[in-house]
Image: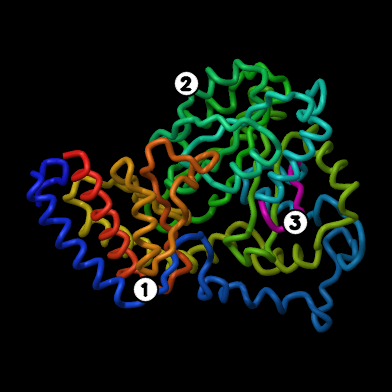
Amino acid sequence: MKKYCEMTKEELLSEKELLEKRYSEKKALGLKLDISRGKPCPEQLALSAPMLDLVNSKTENFKCENGFDIRNYGVVDGIPECRRLFAEILDADPDEVIVTGNSSLNLFYDLIAHAVCHGVPGSERPWGEDKNRKLLCPAPGYDRHFAVGELFGFELVIVKMNADGPDMDEVERLIADPSVKGIICVPKYSNPQGISFSEEVVKRFANLSPAAPDFRIFWDNAYVVHDLYPDGEKDYVPSLLRLAKENGKGNMVYMLGSTSKITFPTAGLAAVASSAENTADFKRMLSFQNIGPDKINQMRHVLFFKDLDGVLKHMRKQAEIIRPKFETVLAVLKAELGETGIARWNSPKGGYFVSAELLPGTAKRTVALCKEAGLTLTGAGSVYPYGKDPEDSVLRIAPTFAPAAELPVAMELFSIAARLAAAEKLLSEK
């Protein structure tokens, strides 16, 4: 097949006619497909069901290792055995970890809110008093991170993502501005591109010298154990907190994580690891808003997993369920778009997403065509701050929740829509 950009007007018209026929056939099926959000499927959730029976009136597992009754108020920073479990997951020390809530996004929100209202260690005043405050946003990135920054009045500054992580030359240039207060990252299997930060990039993060004395790196390690090939090729990202502490810069770092996509999305656990000063500051803040987290749920997780090895064994089972879905997505993209020259995509080793970069100016049209034929995608532009993709080209594909049997037709429809949008765009320029 000729690449679309090499086709004559007549060839493009012929291709467009064939695509319209295929599209009409798919539209006539009355499909109701959804690959828009990164949710675990029912089979994944079922793996964690036994956890629900581990702490109840029959088992009476109501005491944590220090003798505290987990049914009662208190222990705002989490039970010790659960802090130790998350220390293993995040590669930190247990006394640097606070376990609270169920969502790393919620922790990010709380940390931002705390900084805006009260400041953080090193602040001369609350961040909210700086009317020109900025947050660096590697993009494509996670739409909900961007939404939190926008909600709290930050100017969101795009940092380009390279194959090994954010453009660190750009990061180092931007942090010379004291109004830049932080950066939000997903360092392993990033959302949506599946990029894992290289050791060099992590070391440069750990050695940043920002103009703002209270600059913070929000390191949302949401996919730290989410390898698609746990016994094969997988990525490793070193602990930013350990490296930053070696440089005397531990206060810059908040490492976040959760079990949202390990156990249950709204009934899991979340944790933050940071320096002793940051941890004490955040624990003090938590004491005002919460008399104690759900320690019964923390105990369930500890009894279920026991340690990091238990978590990794569980994630192998998850990978067996979702890996074929990713392989289906990639196979259809290659078959349908591989020779067209109008698209490229990542082949992630883990995480929850495949990112497709289409012909510039066609992402919105592709989403609209898919929607009209019964396929829901994440909105075009959502992976950029303010929902504005400067090239109108990047779309996120979330394979995990969809039934495996539906993915081939969903991806075929996606590909037909992308090709049709590209043919229309190129013809408009002839």
**Sequence-wise, which precedes: disc 2 or disc 3?**
3
Q: x, y (%) of residue 140?
A: 46, 41
Which label was assigned to residue 169?
A: 2
* Tag shown at residue 71: none
Residue 194 in sight in this render? yes
The circle on residue 101 is 3
In front here: 270 or 365? 365
What residue lies at 58% left-to-right and 62% top-to-bottom?
Answer: 262
Q: Range of the magenta residues?
A: 96-104
Q: Nearer the viewer, residue 322 or 144?
A: 144
Residue 194: where, in percent of width, then height?
Answer: 43, 47
Q: How is the image coloured?
A: rainbow
Which tag is nearer the camera, tag 2 or tag 1? 1
Of badges 1 and 3, the one in the foreground is: 1
Report the amino acid beneath label 1: Glu
Image point (68%, 48%), residue name:
87
Q: Considering the numbered disc 1 on the image, is that residue within a helix, a strand or a loop?
A: helix
Q: Image quarter for residue 151?
A: top right
Which residue is identified by label 1?
A: 406
From the viewer's perspective, is 47 left or right of 258?
left
Q: Mark 1 or mark 3: which comes first in sequence?
A: 3
- On the image, which quarter does residue 91 sit in? top right
SS for callout 3: loop
